[in-house]
Amino acid sequence: MLKGEVQVTFEISKQDGYLAVYARFRLGRIHTTYEISSGVATDVDREGRVLGVEIIKTFSTKARKIHLKHRIDLNQIQKAVEKRFGISLETEFQKIREATSALA
């Protein structure tokens, strides 16, 4: 992982009805995981730097199509994480938006 690079991974299970998105913003050892809201958690290192964010959403197993745009409100999640840690993550969340748009 290069400096400034954001790694975004997705896991979708139609059988179990969940969508998981994990975005790693920087390398480091996880010291604490904070629950920001239901289905949103943030990993932080010992110095308090945000290492990444995990988003888990559930949906009906009977759904024929899963639209990320309607499942995840990245603007709301970004605001909540930024507020919790008093930082700006505009660049990091823009990378998540780019990755999710490629899946649409």
Image (cartoon, rainbow, N blue to C red):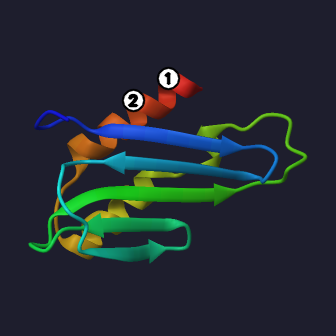
Spatial CA distance of label 2 from label 1 is 6 Å
- Judged from this view, the residue extending furthest toward the top is 102
The amino acid type found where label 2 is placed reads Glu
Q: Nearer the viewer, residue 83 or 47?
A: 47
Q: Residue at x 39, y 29 (%)?
A: 98
Identify whether 54 is placed above or below 23: below
- x and y, in percent, of residue 88 in the image: 18, 56
Q: Which residue is mark 1?
A: 102
Q: Residue 51 occupies which quadrant of the picture?
A: bottom left
Task: Say left or right for 52 vs 102.
Answer: left
Q: Nearer the viewer, residue 95 or 21?
A: 21
Q: Which residue is mark 2?
A: 98
- Judged from this view, the residue extending furthest toward the front is 29
- x and y, in percent, of residue 80 in the image: 36, 67
Task: Say left or right for 100 vs 61.
Answer: left
- Judged from this view, the residue extending furthest toward the right is 62
Q: Residue 91 occupies which quadrant of the picture?
A: top left
Identify whether 2 is placed above or below 27: above
Q: Nearer the viewer, residue 38 or 7?
A: 7
- x and y, in percent, of residue 60 in the image: 83, 53
Q: Residue at x 9, y 72 (%)?
A: 47
